[in-house]
Image: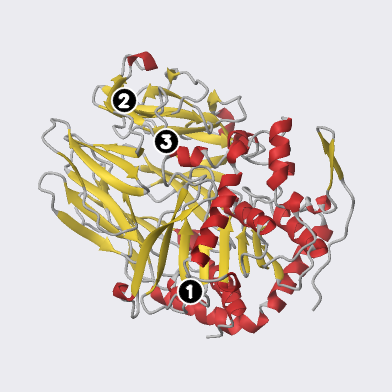
């Protein structure tokens, strides 16, 4: 079967006197039957190329699914007199949300059975559950298109009735005021930016709702939440480098929102309430790794802020949790999360003990102030995730749940480590690695290197039962903690964005070369994978070093950076100027163009390449990977595999449902195994 060849229609794109020719711009129209026909042909071609792996795909899917405990439930947490939990039943794709009154031995009250709600939908996502303070009503959001546009509805938990209220074009989340009839929610504009906060009164239509805040700066996104104390409704508005909050007492839903601290360029802060104070995590006064401050609820402007935890150059504050007797700081030093527990009366100040070389730990769901039990989660590349209750008084642990891996899994069969690769500018890049203990490292060992590297988002070294299918077939799996993420603190992020974005790409390349140099693998058996902004990473590194990898998987890749960042009608564009730069300014235009994968495709040999996307993707529009594949197919000089698979029913996150997405994982693994000659 011949690969599809997209027709060429020349489109001249001019900016700053520079002309770019985009022959595949016409693919930017999902209503055009020719576009759908082309994507369908690409899917058929992908199926043909992977035809020999169909049996293996089925086997991989079955073994991935078989490791997952089908009849499973979350660890219950107590909130306002009820225990809440989520349950999965054998053979079903979606969760069931339940609660029990006062006592865990009480009868189940089923709030939502998403399996029933999803019937007749090819995609279904329920989110944003918010229970009123009188425990009688729950608001929820539904997206059945996969564009991350939710319709909010309200359920009466005493009768089971879905009320007539219907609020469209929202983020899905909402917040109840203390009167149990007023709901605050966030609306999206035509670019899917969250830009307005509205107030809805129970029993009225959306047309009667009141606009309480509009974010007019299109580089900011708005959101609303309730403080842990339940005393305040808080509206936040954030960009990549600045924040602004405003608040009202939750028992005064008609009050006018009061600004906490006016926005200032490069002043970042977030707030939480406890007692007679607001607590503030902020970078004020050049605290690039953040510090913790507090201020009176009466005087919230920054000149009144007092230091609680000082800024430390070597330690990045990720977040904090407040209890009646304790303050818990979630912080990261040398890449590793630590939980620092401090008694308010200064009688205790200690860290939870973690011993593995590479791991991740996070504060869990802790809705109550009046407890000395800290709930947190722990996982590593070899340790299934656990939910743990820790008594901050006597330092005793209770493992409430450890992820069950069905079958013959034995964690002692796997080993993990963290090594450091020297980047070309002298920085040391951490790499977390996992493999089977009996996998022999040599130039013939297959290795999959994963990374993301944008928005300050850190890819943690976490356990995955799905990943065992790779490890058990002799693959090594590695995560490169490259700049653009915050693994080594805020500066690690700042050095991988804007006019230093290329550090992200070079860190990944240098990490890959270090793995080869240390005899973990060779270019003939080295593979790379990344999604979204990590897909941009994939596109950039294969332009720079096309011979470094045997195969690459680019999931929903952001590859047409210049054109997208110049189009402020596309979702998310304007809010990204502080991440990538604004190409309306020539300095940023030239820099972005110099690495944008689509603009830098050349007539040379590229590695085997699998590209995935979703027709309804709201984060990275489907036409970016489609255009990229079309251009690669036209220009590249090799005969290596190049396939594009478009999920015609989903968006950025792929398939909904608990097991459906495993088919995508199985297909990606099968692609790698095909390149390695692994058939079983």
Q: Give the Cα separation between the discs numbered 2 and 1.
A: 46 Å
Whether residue 178 is visible here, answered yes or no, is no
Q: Nearer the viewer, residue 623 or 145?
A: 623
Query: Label 1: which residue?
Result: 475
Q: Is residue 443 above or below residue 452?
A: below
- Per the image, label 1 sits on a secondary structure element best described as loop
Query: Label 3: which residue?
Result: 175
**Relative to residue 315, is residue 642 drawn left or right?**
right
| Residue at the spot 70% in from the left edge and 48% down from the top edge | 596
Q: Give the Cα separation between the discs numbered 3 and 2.
A: 26 Å
Q: Is residue 255 above or below residue 455?
A: above
Near mark 3 (Cα within 10 A), the count class, few <14, some 14-19 or many ≥20, is many
Q: Reading the chain from its start, which is encountered first: label 2 or label 1? A: 2
Q: Is residue 346 above or below residue 661?
A: above
Q: Position of residue 194 (x, y in %)?
A: 56, 35
- Per the image, label 2 sits on a secondary structure element best described as strand
Name the colouring of the figure. Answer: secondary structure
Q: Reading the chain from its start, which is encountered first: label 1 or label 3? A: 3
Asked whether the residues under the numbered discs 3 and 2 touch, taking CB atoms below 8 Å apart as contact, a structural biologist would say no
Q: Nearer the viewer, mark 1 or mark 3?
A: 1
Query: Label 2: which residue?
Result: 293
Q: On the image, which quarter does residue 52 sit in?
A: bottom right
**Relative to residue 102, is residue 134 drawn left or right?**
right
Q: Nearer the viewer, mark 2 or mark 1?
A: 1
- Per the image, label 3 sits on a secondary structure element best described as strand
Q: Position of residue 165 (x, y in %)?
A: 51, 40
């Amino acid at each position: 079967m011949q690969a599809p060849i997209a027709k060429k229609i020349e489109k001249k794109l001019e900016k700053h006197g520079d002309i770019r020719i985009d022959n595949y711009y016409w693919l930017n129209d999902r209503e055009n039957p020719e576009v759908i026909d082309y994507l369908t042909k690409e899917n058929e071609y992908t199926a043909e190329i992977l035809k020999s792996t169909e049996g293996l795909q089925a086997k991989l899917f079955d073994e991935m699914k078989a490791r997952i405990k089908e009849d499973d439930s979350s660890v219950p947490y107590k909130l306002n007199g009820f225990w809440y939990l989520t349950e999965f039943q054998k053979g079903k794709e979606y969760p069931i949300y339940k609660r029990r009154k006062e006592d865990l031995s009480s009868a189940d009250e089923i709030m939502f059975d998403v399996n029933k709600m999803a019937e007749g939908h090819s995609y279904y996502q329920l989110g944003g559950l918010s229970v009123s303070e009188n425990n009688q009503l729950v608001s929820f959001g539904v997206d059945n298109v996969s564009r991350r546009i939710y319709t909010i509805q309200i359920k009466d938990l005493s009768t089971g009735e879905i009320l007539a209220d219907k609020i469209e074009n929202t983020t899905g989340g909402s917040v109840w005021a203390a009167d149990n009839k007023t709901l605050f929610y966030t609306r999206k504009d035509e670019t899917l930016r969250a830009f307005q906060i509205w107030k809805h009164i129970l029993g009225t239509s959306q047309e009667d709702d009141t606009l309480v805040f509009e974010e007019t700066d299109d580089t900011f996104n708005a959101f609303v939440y309730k403080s842990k104390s339940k005393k305040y409704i808080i509206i936040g508005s954030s960009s990549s480098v600045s924040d602004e909050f405003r608040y009202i007492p939750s028992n005064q839903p008609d009050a006018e929102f009061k600004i906490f601290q006016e926005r200032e360029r490069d002043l970042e802060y977030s707030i939480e309430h406890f007692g007679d104070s607001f607590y503030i995590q902020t970078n004020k006064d050049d605290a690039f790794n953040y510090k913790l401050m507090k201020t009176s609820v009466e005087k919230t402007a920054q000149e009144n802020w007092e230091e609680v935890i000082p800024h430390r150059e070597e330690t990045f504050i990720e977040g904090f949790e407040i209890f009646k007797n304790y303050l818990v700081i979630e912080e990261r030093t040398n890449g590793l999360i630590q939980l620092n527990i401090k008694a308010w009366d200064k009688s205790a100040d200690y860290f939870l003990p973690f011993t593995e070389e590479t791991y991740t730990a996070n504060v869990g769901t802790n809705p109550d102030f009046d407890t000395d039990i800290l709930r947190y989660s722990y996982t590593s590349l070899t340790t299934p995730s656990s939910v743990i209750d820790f008594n901050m008084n006597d330092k005793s642990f209770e493992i409430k749940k450890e992820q069950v891996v069905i079958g013959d899994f034995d964690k002692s069969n796997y080993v993990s480590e963290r090594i450091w690769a020297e980047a070309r500018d002298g920085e040391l890049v951490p790499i977390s690695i996992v493999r089977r203990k009996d996998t022999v490292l040599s130039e013939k060992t297959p290795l999959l290197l994963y990374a993301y590297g944008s928005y300050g988002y850190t890819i943690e070294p976490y356990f995955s039962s799905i990943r065992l299918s790779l490890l058990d077939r002799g693959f090594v799996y590695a995560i490169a903690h490259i700049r653009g993420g915050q693994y080594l603190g805020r500066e690690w992020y700042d050095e991988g964005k804007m006019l230093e974005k290329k550090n992200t790409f070079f860190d990944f390349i240098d990490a890959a070369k270090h793995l080869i140099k240390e005899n973990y693998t060779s270019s003939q058996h080295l593979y790379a994978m990344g999604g979204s902004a990590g897909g941009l990473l994939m596109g950039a590194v294969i332009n720079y070093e096309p011979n470094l990898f045997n195969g690459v998987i680019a999931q929903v890749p952001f590859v047409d950076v210049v054109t997208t960042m110049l189009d402020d009608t596309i979702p998310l564009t304007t809010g990204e100027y502080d991440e990538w730069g604004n190409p309306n300014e020539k300095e940023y235009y030239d820099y972005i163009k110099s690495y944008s994968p689509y603009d830098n495709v050349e007539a040379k040999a590229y590695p085997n390449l699998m590209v995935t996307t979703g027709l309804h993707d709201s984060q990275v529009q489907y036409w970016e990977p489609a255009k990229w594949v079309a251009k690669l197919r036209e220009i590249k000089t090799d005969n290596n595999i190049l396939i594009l698979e478009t999920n015609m029913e989903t968006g950025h996150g792929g398939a909904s449902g608990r097991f459906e997405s495993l088919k995508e994982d199985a297909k990606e693994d099968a692609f790698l195994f095909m390149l390695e000659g692994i058939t079983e």
